[in-house]
Image: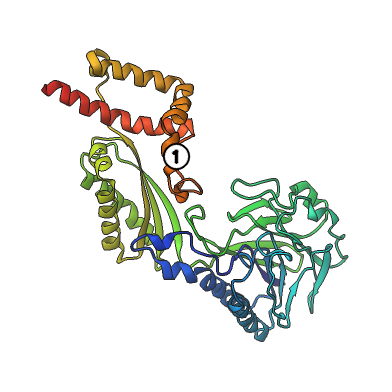
Amino acid sequence: MFKFLHAADIHLDSPLHKLEYYEGAPVQELRQATRRAFENLVELAIVEEADFVLIAGDLYDGDWKDYNTGLYFISQMGRLREAHIPVTIVTGNHDAASKITKTLRLPEGVGIFPSGSPSTIRINNLDVAIHGQSFSSPSIKKDLSAKYPSPLPGAFNIGILHTCATGREGHEPYAPCTVEGLLSKGYDYWALGHVHKREVLFEDPLILFPGNTQGRHIRETGSKGCMLVTVDDKGRSRAHFKPLDVIRWFKIEKDISNAETGYDVVDLFRLELEPLLEENRGLPLVVRLEIIGVSRAHDELASDMERWTNEIRSMAMETSGERIWIEKVKLSTRLPLDTKTLESATGPVGELIRYLEEIRSDPDILENMGEEFLGELKRKLPRELKEGEERIPLDDPKWLLEMLEQVRPMLLSRLMRKDESS
C-alpha cells in the first residue's frame, strides 16, 4: 500500500485584485494566503508520510516578479527532501516554459516534466509510473494526452495533465481531452489540473480535478485543498479531500421579502452568518451578500446603499470578532406595488406606467436606449468600471432590464405618493 497527494493550481504569490481599495479588507492575510496554503500542503505530506506529491500545473501564477517566489518554493521543497518525499510537476498555462523567464536549480527529489513531448518518471522503491507533459506556451489547444505513452506493465500508472477536459465555464479551453480518451490509455489514476473547482470525472479509475489550494476571489468559493490518495495492495485507489486554505470565500443570497426596514435586513444577515462561522471554525471568511425579493425595505436600502453596506459590515465584524469581511453587498430587490392601483392610474403616472411596460416587453427599445442615451456615460466611465467583473454593462439589454425592474417600483411609488398629496 502507498499514498500520495494530488494538488494543482497553487498560483504562488498570486496578486491581489483591487482589494487594497476596500476599507477593512484582510489584505495581509490574502497577500500571504497562497504561501500559507502551500505550507499546509507540505505539512500534510509530512504528517501523512506520503510517498510522493503531484502538482498538476500552475504552481506559479506567471513570471516571477523577482527571485523570492522561487526561493520560497525551494525552501519548502527542502522540507520534503528531508522527509524523503519526491515531488513531480507539470507546468500549465500560467507557468508554461515560455512564460517563466527566471529559473533556479531545483533541489533533489523535484522533477518537472519536459514540454517537448510526453515522458515517464518512476518513483524509487515503488512500482509507480507517472506519465506527463508540461505546457511549452500559455495557450495549448491540442490534446496532449493523446500521445501519452502506454502504461508500464506491473506498475501503478498515473497520468498527470493540465487540461480543461471537455471545457469548463470560466476556464480557457487548454489541452482539451475527453474522459473516453483518458480511459483508453489504461492508466490507474489521472491527476488533472486547471479547473479550480473540485470535480470527479470518473470513479474507476479515478479521474479528477482537486481544485485549487486557496481561493483568491469571489469566483472561488468554499473549501479549497488537495486530494490524499491511498492505493491498496490490489491497486485500488481512494481519494479523500483535505482542506488547505487559510481564508475562505462565500456568496450568500437572501430573500428579504418579509423585511420592513434596513435594520430588519441587517438582522436577517446576522442569522445567515452565525452558522457560517460554526461550519468554518478558526478561518477568516470573505463574504459577498446579494439581497433579493420584493420588500418594503427596498426604498430605504436603495436610497443610501453605502450606509447599509457599512451597517452590515459593522454587524459582521461584531458577530464574528472580525473574522468575517463583507466583500460586497449587491442589491437586487424591488418595492411591492398595488396592481389595482397601477391599473387605474391616469394622467402622467399612467402614461409612464404604460411606457415602462412597453420597454419591459420589447428588448429592442432597451438596446436602443443603451446606445442613444447611455453611450456618453459609458465613454466617461473609468476603466475599472468598463472591464472585468466589476464592469457596468450599459450595452447589455438583460442588465438594463434588471435595473429597470429595480428602479420601476421605487419610481412609481414615489410619483404616486406625490400625485396623491398634490
Q: Which quadrant is the C terminus positioned in?
A: top left
Front residue of 151/72: it is: 72
Tell me the element at label 1. helix
Q: Is residue 345 visible?
A: no
Tell me the kind of residue under disc 1.
Lys
Residue at x 43% of width, y 54% of height: 250
Please state the horizontal and vertical placement of residue 386, each as a whole percent of the image.
48, 45
Front residue of 402/253: it is: 402
Please state the horizontal and vertical placement of residue 320, each as a whole percent of the image.
31, 63
Front residue of 298/348: it is: 348
Residue at x 26% of width, y 16% of height: 350
Residue at x 57% of width, y 77% of height: 43
299 horizontally vs 152: left or right: left
Please state the horizontal and vertical placement of residue 378, each as a whole percent of the image.
44, 39
Front residue of 92/244: it is: 92
> Which residue position is annotated with label 1?
378
Tally of numbered tags = 1
Please state the horizontal and vertical placement of residue 412, each as a whole percent of the image.
26, 25
Report which quarter residue 233 is drawn in: bottom right
Relative height, residue 329 to residue 47 (above, below): above
Report which quarter residue 336 is drawn in: top left
324 horizontally vs 204: left or right: left
